Image: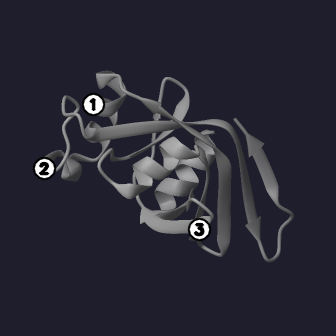
Amino acid sequence: MQEVYEFLKKCGTYYLATVDGDQPRVRPFGTVDIFEDKLYIQTGKVKDVSKQIQANPKVEICGFVEGKWIRVAGELVRDDRIEPKKHMLDAYPSLQGMYSAEDDNTEVLYFKNATATISSFTDAPKVITF
């Protein structure tokens, strides 16, 4: 999982895919954190992406850097505790103007039953489960 985290951090921007009914939806994301040995992302509960994840927690993210790409498939689980929200916002101080660990909008979600695949055009894929 640490390798997945480091890869996503190096990407800076990765893309999160959800479904809205039968329509795929993809958008750029940039938050990633490890808290209590779980890989977390962050969004706002008022956003459509949050509603889509709550309706169907199966997601996939994809990022590309230095000729390699990562795909992480799994389920996202909302964690409403203040501690993981604070940990995430401490890691991304630029978000503190829009989000607070104590507000009702900040949402952190961790991956469950996740499989990450790191690929390139020249190397065999590497699979990491967590």
Relative to 97, 39 lies left or right = right
Q: Which residue is mark 1?
A: 86
- Of the numbered discs 3 and 2, the one sitting upstream in the chain is 3
Task: Find residue 97 and name its label.
Answer: 2
Q: Nearer the viewer, mark 3 or mark 2?
A: 3
How far is mark 3 from mark 2, CA to CA?
A: 32 Å
Q: Amino acid at mark 2?
A: Gly
Q: Is 82 situated above or below 14? A: above
Crowd around label 3: few <14 · some 14–19 · many ≥20 (10 Å): few
Under tag 3, what secondary structure? strand
Residue 111, image x, y percentages? 58, 38
Q: Nearer the viewer, mark 3 or mark 1?
A: 3
Q: Amino acid at mark 1?
A: Lys
The residue depicted at 19 percent of the width and 28 percent of the height is: 102
- Of the numbered discs 3 and 1, the one sitting upstream in the chain is 3
Q: Which residue is mark 3?
A: 23
Under tag 2, what secondary structure? helix
How far is mark 1 from mark 2, CA to CA?
A: 13 Å
Residue 121, image x, y percentages? 79, 77
Relative to 29, 91 lies left or right = left
| Count of marks, rendered view | 3
Q: Looking at the picture, tell me which residue is in the foreground, 83 or 44.
A: 44
Q: Quadrant of residue 125?
A: bottom right
The reply to whether dot 3 and dot 1 touch (C-beta < 8 Å) is: no
Residue 46, image x, y percentages? 29, 49
Under tag 1, what secondary structure? helix
How far is mark 3 from mark 1, CA to CA?
A: 33 Å
Q: Amino acid at mark 3?
A: Gln
Q: Looking at the picture, tell me which residue is in the foreground, 98 or 104.
A: 104
Relative to 88, 97 lies left or right = left
Q: Is 84 situated above or below 115? A: above
- The C terminus, quarter of image: top right
